[in-house]
Image (spheres, rainbow, N blue to C red):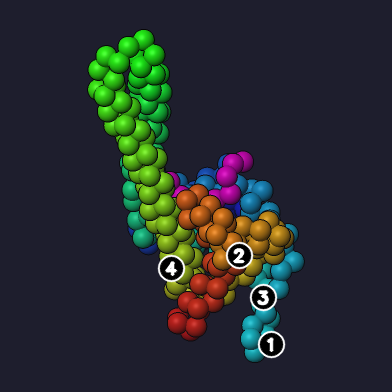
Amino acid sequence: MNLKIEANNYLRRFDHTGKLKFRMQEVNNAWVGSDGYVTLCPKYAKKFMDSKEVLRFEDGSTFVPNGHERIAATIAHEAAHWAKDHVNQGNVLFLYQPIMLGCLSILSLSATYITCSIAILFKIIHHFQFYKVRNLALISTALFVASVAGFALNNWAEMRRSRKNEYEADTYGMELLQKAGMRPEIMLWSRKALYAPRKKFHDDRDPDTSWYNRIMYELSSTHPIPHLRYERCLAHLKKIQ
Ligand SMILES: [Zn+2]
């Protein structure tokens, strides 16, 4: 089986805009960019190809996708990101706002440090205009606190949006599979295949197990943990069947 040809064929089936192109690169799992390229890392594809996972349903039935279908799940997910225009959402904010806020916090922290030092120095030498320097120190400290809070808030909003898009790419990807005459369960299986081999890694970061995990998850996770994605896919399967 030629991975490149296979993935390209699926892209033609799932991409209803006719604009997506495909390439393989030895980096970063799989993604779709605003340039219209779906990029797949061969190592990431291999993870699915080698997986021994078996999908078990409540009624006792099982499902194991064949090699072709395993590639289809990844391509459908990326085509869904494209179809839902996720690639063009919030890129500017996502990149620049944290940088701006980061610079602002460094500047205001430096200003706090300098003005505090001057204030202390003035107090030591003589009491000359101490209140003015103190006010400056207060203002720059407030600026620092505000920029850190802004940074956290921006990250929280961006990560939340990103995770929402991942859920949507999974569920809409299932619909793309279905429209192409394939089983939407393939997406469910692929989420399980991502989760199972690194169960401990993912469980240690489960946002529902501690307040620390919740904060880290809210502020830094672009992707929901696989078992949450699996549950979302399972709920969606019941809806579209
Ligand atoms: Zn995605």
In x, y percent, where is residue 99? 39, 34
- The 10 Å Cα crowd at callout 1, few under 14, some 14 to 19, many 20 or more, is few
In primary-sequence order, the first of circles 2 and 3 is 3
Give the CA separation, mark 2 to mark 3.
Answer: 25 Å
Q: Secondary structure at mark 2?
A: loop
Which range of residues does the magenta coloring cover? 26-33
Mark 2 vs mark 4: in front: 2
Q: State whether residue 26 is above or below residue 109.
A: below
The disc label shown at residue 60, or none = 1
Mark 3 highlights which residue?
55
The image quarter in which residue 203 lies? bottom right
Give the CA separation, mark 2 to mark 4.
Answer: 29 Å
Mark 2 vs mark 1: in front: 2
State whether label 2 is within 8 Å of ligand 1: no
Q: Residue at x 33, y 40 (%)?
A: 146
Q: State whether residue 94 is above or below residue 17.
A: above
Q: Secondary structure at mark 3?
A: strand
Callout 2 amino acid: Thr
The image quarter in which residue 172 lies? bottom left
| 56 sits to left or right of 225 | right
The disc label shown at residue 172, or none = 4
The disc label shown at residue 209, or none = 2
- The 10 Å Cα crowd at callout 4, few under 14, some 14 to 19, many 20 or more, is many
Foreground pick, 221 / 209: 209
In primary-sequence order, the first of circles 1 and 3 is 3
Give the CA separation, mark 1 to mark 3.
Answer: 10 Å
